[in-house]
Image (cartoon, grey):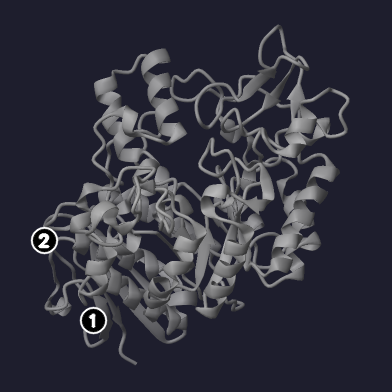
Amino acid sequence: MDKAWWKESVVYQIYPRSFADSNGDGIGDLNGITSKLDYLQKLGIDVIWLSPVYKSPNADNGYDISDYEAIMDEFGTMEDYDRMLKAAHEHGIRIVMDLVVNHTSDEHKWFIESRSSRTNPKRDYYIWRDPVDGHEPNNWGSCFSGSAWKFDEKTGQYYLHLFAEKQPDLNWTNPKVRREVFDMMTRWCEKGIDGFRMDVISLISKPDGLPDAPVMGGGLYGDPNICANGPHVHEYLQEMRNTVLSKFDLMTVGECAGVTLEEAKKYANAAGTELNMVFQFEHVGLDGGDGIKWSTKKLPLVPLKENLSKWQNGLDGVAWNSLYFCNHDQPRIVSRLGNDSDQYRERSAKAIATVLHMMQGTPYVYQGEELGMTNYPWTSVDEFNDLESVNGYYELTGKVGMDPKELFPMIAHKSRDNARTPMQWDDSENAGFTTGKPWLAVNPNYTKVNAKEQVSRPDSVFHYYRKLISLRHSSELIVYGHYELLLPDDPDLFVYRRYLGDEELLCAANLSEHARTLDIPERFRDGRVLIQNIPEHDVKDGNMAPYEAYVIRKAR
């Protein structure tokens, strides 16, 4: 397999609004990020993926962009950005920008022109359609609930928005739109950034004729995933590669809703004609409810192992995996797969990190994951900021008739706001995130769960992540080795081996609350323990405590 720096890197995602506030307005900012680069360097990460910092009216927390080449006022200035980029590079850290080009804000100058008249030169920059029998052009639903179409009184047509009303979809069939996007990307690359994470990039090519979509789970509207992996998406990405990406040394990862293994082999093919890797969502959808994402279920281990193994083996040698459990759209993994009680929070956080970071692919750490941050104890829908959570609650209770008492715990468990509560830096007021009033509530467990305490304690989750990252940096076996799942049907144990040439390692984790035994293969019994989350235990006795994890390298 060809080697590359982005295969050997560990990425840290920053959600700027919630990371570090430098000026006391309650909102994280660029100078706050710059002030924490020493911390990230100590952790050992190689790349920061920066969620959007562009100018935006914030209908969807920055994913509705009104100017791709200006900085959101709340986050600072372009001078602040340039200073952060320079400082990150001085710390040996690359910066990957979030690229949001399926849609813009309705306050973007392109859309303001587009909606001004049917004859405006930029009318065709977006997707406009006439009413059909006085209603929407088709049954498509928005990812944020409700219809994906908004009627515009002035011009008498509907525009498409697969997300919020204030996020009209760009018309990628228009070559002028593609040229505008590629020129903008080129200017960012010339500024010195190191890559792009491409938001919902699998949705940019809509199906020909815009047909009706299947309706899911008793909902009112058709599934927006009908737009995933559309007829021209690979053509557009190859054009992007030829026009922009091939001219710079970049890391590229596509967020690909609805992607299949076979499609991923096209997006992230080893020949490098499109992207370096994709984010797929199959594994983080395994704890969904009946036809909806909302539930209080725990991630089921046997299907999780099966799914992750499918991607490990399916992409081996032909494409590249991205490894993640957490991001700004996912609840905290320690509350979802592990155990966030005081007794097991740290141990289960370490166990989950072990099974993820020992796989083949590029691992992603979401801010606070390296501390074992947990879901927030929500008590009311009024506490949510996330559009998806709020809209989902009111649509499912008001229009579908679900019992609010039944639905609320499901949304509380799966809400994206769980990931967006402010970063917990220390045990001072507001967890050291801000001297003002935080834009979203701080998790009350910050007095126990915070970076200052963990950096100072050698056996913390933070220092465990440091060791995992260090192991990856020093081992081609961990980065490039092949993968084989062991004990696929065991409901508690996640065990697999990695192998490359004569080298081999065993990764084992008990992701349950009860003790188990594991018959360690004989060839590992005189091997070296690379890492373990219960250091005082001789792992080779075969006994596994609740949430115990370790990695053994076969003796040479």
Q: Which of the two discs, 1 and 2, labels the residue nearer the N terminus?
A: 2
> Which mark is drawn over residue 309?
none
User: What residue would you read off at disc 1?
Assistant: 522
Vertical comparison of 248 with 56: above or below: below
Q: Nearer the viewer, residue 160 or 211?
A: 160
User: What residue would you read off at disc 2?
Assistant: 515
State the CA–CA distance, disc 1 to disc 2.
21 Å
- Which part of the image, by quadrant, shows the N terminus? bottom right
Q: What kind of element bears circle 2?
A: loop
Task: Decide if residue 442 is in sight here.
Answer: yes
Task: Decide if residue 262 is in sight here.
Answer: no
Instruction: Estimate how packed mark 1 is, as few (under 14), some (14 to 19) or many (20 or more) residues with alpha carbons within 10 Å.
Output: few
Q: Residue at x 63, y 43 (%)?
A: 65
**Horizontal and vertical percent for residue 435?**
33, 53
**Which amino acid type is shown beneath numbered disc 1?**
Glu
**Which amino acid type is shown beneath numbered disc 2?**
Ala
**Horizontal and vertical percent for residue 556?**
34, 92
Q: Residue at x 76, y 41 (%)?
A: 172
